[in-house]
Image (cartoon, rainbow, N blue to C red):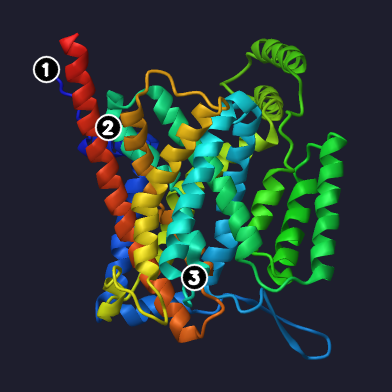
Amino acid sequence: MKLTPTYSWQKTVRTQGLFYNEFFKRPWAQGAVLIICVAVAMLLANLPFTKDFYHGVLETNFSLCFQTPGGQRVMFPRDMTVESFINDILMTVFFFTVGLEIRREMKTGELSSPKKAMMPVIAALGGVLAPAAIFCCVNAGTSSASGWGIPTATDIAFAVGILSILGDKVPLSLKVFLTALAIADDLIAILVVAFFYGGQINPGLLCAALLLILFGVVANRLGEKRGFFYLVPALAIWTLFYYSGIHATMSGVVMAFLVPMSPRYSESYFRAKSRRCYRRLSECEDGPFPNGRQRHYLRKIARVSSGSVSMSARLEHKLSPIVNFVIMPLFALANAGVEIADPSYLKIFSFDALTGGVGLGIFLGLVIGKPLGISLASFLALKLGVGQMPSNASWKMLVAVACLGGIGFTMSIFVDTLSFSDQSPEIMQQLRDMGKVAVLMASLAAGLLGALLINIVSGFETKRARAR
């Protein structure tokens, strides 16, 4: 009997490939990767033999140097380091993807009609105002008062990831509610960054950026679907925002709302063109597949298929994995590395007359302010008749799910990196480091609290249902 040799390494590679594909498709995968990156960043920033290397890499100059005909050296972008490259350029791609997602939800998703959008939007607004109010009460009159925007954001990846782990303990309607709330929360956070955490405005550069934005609007209205007409203005708008005093990442949101949402080809054109190509393809049977003529028609089918999907949808589909598993982990590696050799960074519940209680305000804002604001705003929306309770959901479960809104993480750390710029460099860095530690601890506490309450409420409701 002849045995066919089996190659164990081929099976191993195939098994590993399936494992990686399945892992990255899981809703909680992004959260798991971010947690690992946070742990790695904390280790790199605190281990004696790695902290100098870690900070040295982040502070490495990342600008391009040009020499003018007169011999003068010009750096572009100005004062760009590896850390600012991640925060100002890579995070622009993140905000661009967020903008595409918000726009999609506003057109066809949970924010597409006033009836659908009102409840999560009002809840998101309450989830922003309550933490900001708590932070301001704790830090009123101190140098950390400008950090009120830090505890106002919700990290959709972690919140939805925890819900996916909890499975059917949470009604589907509440999962949709939390997702829509987090999207509305992102939009509010974007506005907060744009209006309150920019620099000194340069009117001339801002006007030039507005003219390019107007060009994008006109191109969209005229039905222009070619990417070149949006890519070049996008790069120019980012540059103008970077030098005009508005945070450069906001250019990503602006361009996301200019990208065409309608496909280049209609459904009837796609069907007719693809039928013709498939018919011609079947007539080309000479030689091995695919021969020269068959490749020609396959490329035509690929082009018409791509053109039948909107540019917005194509970009969101292509960029989402890059954002989730490359850009966000790099952001966590660059910004979560807080050196905690100084014990003052760990005293997040302390209060100082000069610097205030930045850690205390953030912790209370995320852990208490978020669920309180979301719950009260939802209750008010129902009482006023402008909102509708998610189907098959109880108030107890809504409050439990609202606790997950206190997972700030990505957006809270991002706002933290922009805060306290009116202070001296030493105090600014101390406040930002304390803020990052508080965000990490508050996000962990909010996630554990939300998961615990959901399990308790689910068990109680299950027992009550059986008793009936």
Tell which tag, 2 or 3, sits nearer the viewer: 3
| Position of residue 34 in the picture relative to residue 110 (left or right) | left
Label ID, residue 1? 1
* Picture residue at 31% right of the left edge, 30% below the top: 396
Q: Distance from label 3 to label 1 (Cα)? A: 81 Å
**Disc 1 on helix, strand or loop?**
loop
| Residue drawn at 34 percent across, 72 percent down | 338
Report crowding for label 2: few under 14, some 14 to 19, many 20 or more residues within 10 A (C-alpha). few
Residue drawn at point x = 82 percent, y = 44 percent: 217
Taking the view exactly as shown, the residue that stands out farthest to the front is 383
Q: Nearer the viewer, mark 1 or mark 2?
A: 2
Residue 236 relative to residue 115: left or right:
right
Helix, strand or loop under label 2: helix
Tags 1 and 2 touching, CB below 8 Å: no
Q: CA distance from mark 2 to mark 3?
A: 37 Å
User: Up-down: is 164 above or below 361?
Assistant: above
Residue 261: % across, % down:
71, 33
Q: Which mark is residue 145?
A: 3
Query: Is residue 413 shown to the viewer in this render?
Result: no
Residue corresponding to mark 2: 166
- Point out the tag, 3 or 1, that comes first from the N-terminus: 1
Image point (40%, 79%), residue name: 430
Please state if 229 lies on the left or on the right of 311 as rendered: right
Q: Amino acid at mark 3?
A: Ala
Residue 460 as seen in the image, left or right of residue 25: left
Q: The disc labelled 2 sits on which kind of residue? A: Leu
**Residue 160, quarter of picture:** top left
Q: Position of residue 19 (x, y in %)?
A: 30, 36
